[in-house]
Amino acid sequence: MVIPHYGSPAPAQALIAQLLEQRDLEIPLEVIVSDDLSPEPFPETAGVTVVRRDSNGGFGAAVNSGAAAARQSHLLILNSDLEVERDFVARLIRSAEPWQPAVCAPMLVGTDGQTQWAGRHFPQHRHHIIEWLTPLARFRPRLHEAVGHDTRCAAGTTVPVDWLVGAALLVPRSEFEAVGGFDEHYFMNSEEVDLQRQLRERRIPSVFLGDVQVRHEGGGSSANEKRVRWVTQSRIRYARKWNEHPAALRLGLRAASLVNLAFNVGRRLAGRRLHPLQTFKRELSSISAAGPDR
């Protein structure tokens, strides 16, 4: 198990305590924490291998460093902000076994009890543009397919999908190494879909395992403005890498920002405490940024 660490050690420590209590396992667990030059270093911990990076490279780089120290046949990549049951690992392995070699992931459930749609469709520009549009925000609970969520991924359902969210991801180590691990040009976001697209070319499927669930807080390691910048830039990088017209994506997002500006001006005139021009400039900055603000 590889857990990237940046920030407070408390969430990872809580998760590790749950992992070290896992039952019904046929092999011993190998727990690896990859400290991504965190301002609060992860402490040495009994039963845990701590890998310390000398630079802050983001999620993919941290996982790659941790994976390099792994010895088991599979990597279980875990965000630190997860809560797992005592039989989580055993159930995940049993559910994934018939599909191997494959990338597998459990159902992610938020702290509000709602699914976080771990299974997704390969990104399309329209997914990102629809998600960018502020006037559609109130309708997002009904727009899952429109923003790329695979709505077949329900509790109790096992189904192959295009890609799986990287918060909890089981990957054959040999296949991970065969494609060079995560592309470290992504700082945060899109590295997992990029990896799974490369593995799909090697005929390695991605499979959603809805009979296994974990609780995922999500978004706890970064401020919202930084996260928007990281997500936007990673999506543009993905489009560029896979020859999917990144200029068209930028143009579509800028057009959506103009719509947002007009919408927010109307809300401001209606008495809402908003700053439409500041928001507009911030959106354009995220679209045009040369790279992530680390």
Image (cartoon, helix red, strand yellow):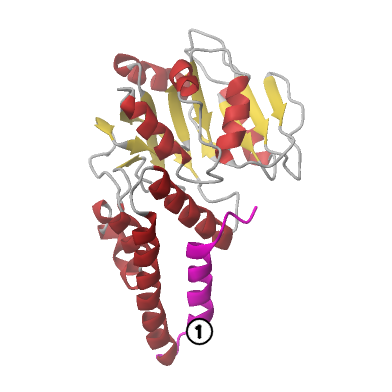
Q: Residue at x 46, y 56 (%)?
A: 232
Compared to 272, does 212 lie above or below?
A: above
Q: 275 or 109, which is in the foreground?
A: 275
**Residue at the disc numbered 1:** 273
Asked which secondary structure carries label 1, the reply is loop
Residue 23: percent from left, percent from top: 51, 16
Q: Residue 150 vs residue 52: left or right?
A: left
Q: Residue at x 30, y 49 (%)?
A: 148
Residue 113 visible, this angle: no
Q: Quadrant of the N terminus?
A: top right
Q: 283 or 32, which is in the foreground?
A: 283
Q: Residue 285 colored magenta?
A: yes
Residue 97: percent from left, percent from top: 34, 15
Q: Residue 23 colored magenta?
A: no
Q: Range of the magenta residues? A: 270-294
Where, by quadrant of the figure, is residue 45 drawn? top right
Residue 58 visible, this angle: yes
Mark 1 surroundings: few (<14), some (14-19) or many (≥20) residues within 10 A: few
* Count of all numbered marks drawn on residues in the image: 1
Q: Residue reaching furthest left?
A: 152
Q: Residue 64 vs residue 280: left or right?
A: right
Where, by quadrant of the figure, is residue 101 drawn? top left
Q: Residue at x 40, y 20 (%)?
A: 91
**Amino acid type at mark 1:** Arg
Residue 143: percent from left, percent from top: 26, 58
